[in-house]
Image: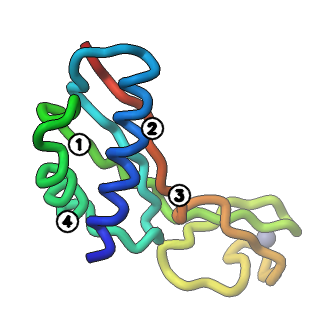
Amino acid sequence: MHELSIAQSLLAIVLDEARRHQVNKVTKVAVKIGALAGVVPSALTFSFDLIKEGTKAAEAELVVEQAPAQGVCHACEGEIDMSRLVDQCPHCGSKDIEFTGGQELYVDHIEAE
Ligand SMILES: [Zn+2]
């Protein structure tokens, strides 16, 4: 399962941070996941809850923040909603557009005691 391996890398990052800052327990882990990252948030929290047992993050709540799919047009500098497949700028019709968000996947912040 795709989400399980992502949960494992997230947990590794969290435990690494916990060790570095010498915390007793992690209480919250906020992750940012782009709408196009191909991750099902509920599957990710389920996987995370399975593997966190017995670690400093055993009581941590995984909070998933979804980042919208966005793009920008190089011709008119307009912002574009990329949640649907678009191949040209809805403002000026240019095809010189680029993704700026929606594919990210990272630990945004961690709360600990
Ligand atoms: Zn444009």
Task: State if disc 2 and disc 4 touch (CB < 8 Å).
Answer: no
Task: Give the residue at mark 4.
Answer: 43
Please provide percent x and percent y for residue 32. 42, 48
Is 39 displayed left or right of 56 in the figure? right
Task: State if disc 3 and disc 4 touch (CB < 8 Å).
Answer: no
Q: At 18% across and 44% down in the image, what residue appears?
A: 52
Question: Hey, which quadrant is residue 96 in on the image?
Answer: bottom right
Task: Give the residue at mark 3.
Answer: 104
Local crowd at mark 1 within 10 Å, few (<14), some, or many (≥20)?
A: many
Q: At 34% across and 38% down in the image, what residue appears?
A: 30
Disc 2 element? strand
Task: Give the residue at mark 1.
Answer: 62
> Sequence order check: which comes first, mark 1 or mark 3?
1
> Sequence order check: which comes first, mark 1 or mark 2?
1
Is residue 18 placed above or below 10 in the rendered structure?
above
Q: At 19% across and 35% down in the image, what residue appears?
A: 55
- Badge 2 amino acid: Asp
> Sequence order check: which comes first, mark 1 or mark 4?
4
- Indicate yes or no: mark 2 CB to ligand 1 under 8 Å: no
Task: State if disc 4 and disc 1 touch (CB < 8 Å).
Answer: no
Q: Nearer the viewer, residue 102 or 24?
A: 24
Q: Nearer the viewer, residue 88 or 19?
A: 19
Task: Give the residue at mark 2.
Answer: 108
Question: Hey, which quadrant is residue 23 in on the image?
Answer: top left
Local crowd at mark 2 within 10 Å, few (<14), some, or many (≥20)?
A: few
**Residues at marks 2 and 3, CA–CA distance in whole angstroms:** 11 Å
Please provide percent x and percent y for residue 28. 25, 30
Is 111 displayed left or right of 34 in the figure? left
**Residues at marks 1 and 2, CA–CA distance in whole angstroms:** 11 Å
**Residues at marks 1 and 4, CA–CA distance in whole angstroms:** 11 Å
